[in-house]
Amino acid sequence: MDTSLIRSPIYQQLNQRLRSALATEYRSGDQFLTEREVADKFQVSRATANKSLASLVSEGFLEFRKGIGTFVRRDVIDYDVRSLVSFTEKARAAGKTPSTELITFGKLTAAEVDAEIGTALQVSGDDLLWEMERLRLADGVPVIWEHRYVVHRSCPKLTKSQAESSLYRAWTETHGLVIAGANEVIRAVLPKKEEARRLRTTAQTPVLEVTSVGFLDDNGPFWWERTLYRSDQYEFHTRLGPIQSATPARGKLR
């Protein structure tokens, strides 16, 4: 047996091997290994092979076509709600070429933004914020529109060129910041007319809205962001744990 698959649980180790194969040996639309082929190649049981393939289907890496087989799926970009991963990396993982159109970039004071944003970022009055609007494209197709405010004192030397690329990379590699995570609220909404125009969709087509507050490792709020994702270009993925009690409630019913 392949020694890299000895550790338990085996199917999780197998998942990593299959993900690696997807990234290096297959292209979008290619037919993938069958359950029997996976079992034979990696010397695991058919049940383990089936569980691993089912997991990759549920995560959006593969798609099952009834009566035909399992195929590589990279045309839709994956948004993993469990972690922060840059759009640039996600687009490339989906086999697409990422690019950014910077619409707005500049500074303003906390007094000039909505009170909700100032409260979330713990700023007020003359405290400075970076403001930026960005359109993110994959293979030239707009997939994300974002409007973000960033606490200036935490990153005073941010540049326009950095805002035109991966902010996560600039913050962590150039500015030495440690991003602890973000709180997010995800909803389906109808875009405003201008938002729909930028995303090349219609005002009657729902988009996925993510409103988030990002934090540094000292738990200080760092950014506030409202982002719209084209629902035909993005899928949101997560993995749920065991069943737990819903009391006390941890969310809101609208």
Image (cartoon, grey):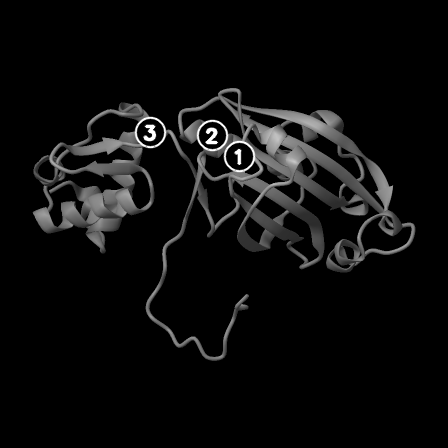
The first of marks 1 and 3 along the sequence is 3
Judging by the rendered image, the residue that carries numbered circle 1 is 87
Separation of marks 2 and 3 at Cα, in angstroms: 13 Å
Judging by the rendered image, the residue that carries numbered circle 2 is 91
Separation of marks 1 and 2 at Cα, in angstroms: 6 Å
Q: Position of residue 138 (x, y in %)?
A: 50, 25
Q: Where is residue 201 in the image (x, y as percent from the top left)?
A: 54, 31
Quarter of the rendering occupied by the C terminus: bottom right
Q: Which residue is drawn at 41% across and 30% down?
A: 93
Separation of marks 1 and 3 at Cα, in angstroms: 17 Å
Judging by the rendered image, the residue that carries numbered circle 3 is 23
Residue 5 higher or lower than 116, as above or below = above
Residue 191 left/right relative to 29: right
Label 2 crowd bin: few (<14), some (14–19), many (20+), radius 10 Å: many
Asked if disc 1 and disc 2 are in contact, CB closer than 8 Å, the reply is yes
* Visible residue check, residue 23: yes
Residue 127 left/right relative to 157: right
- Looking at the rendered structure, the secondary structure element under dot 2 is helix
Q: Where is residue 251 in the image (x, y as percent from the top left)?
A: 53, 68
Viewer-side residue, 141 vs 46: 141
Quarter location, residue 203: top right
* Visible residue check, residue 45: no
Viewer-side residue, 161 vs 217: 161
Asked if disc 2 and disc 3 are in contact, CB closer than 8 Å, the reply is no
Nearest to the eye among marks 2 and 3: give it.
2
The first of marks 2 and 3 along the sequence is 3
Asked if disc 1 and disc 3 are in contact, CB closer than 8 Å, the reply is no
Q: Residue at x 64, y 38 (%)?
A: 146
Q: Which residue is drawn at 50% across and 75% down?
A: 249
The kind of residue on which mark 2 rests is Ala
- Looking at the rendered structure, the secondary structure element under dot 3 is helix
The kind of residue on which mark 3 rests is Ala
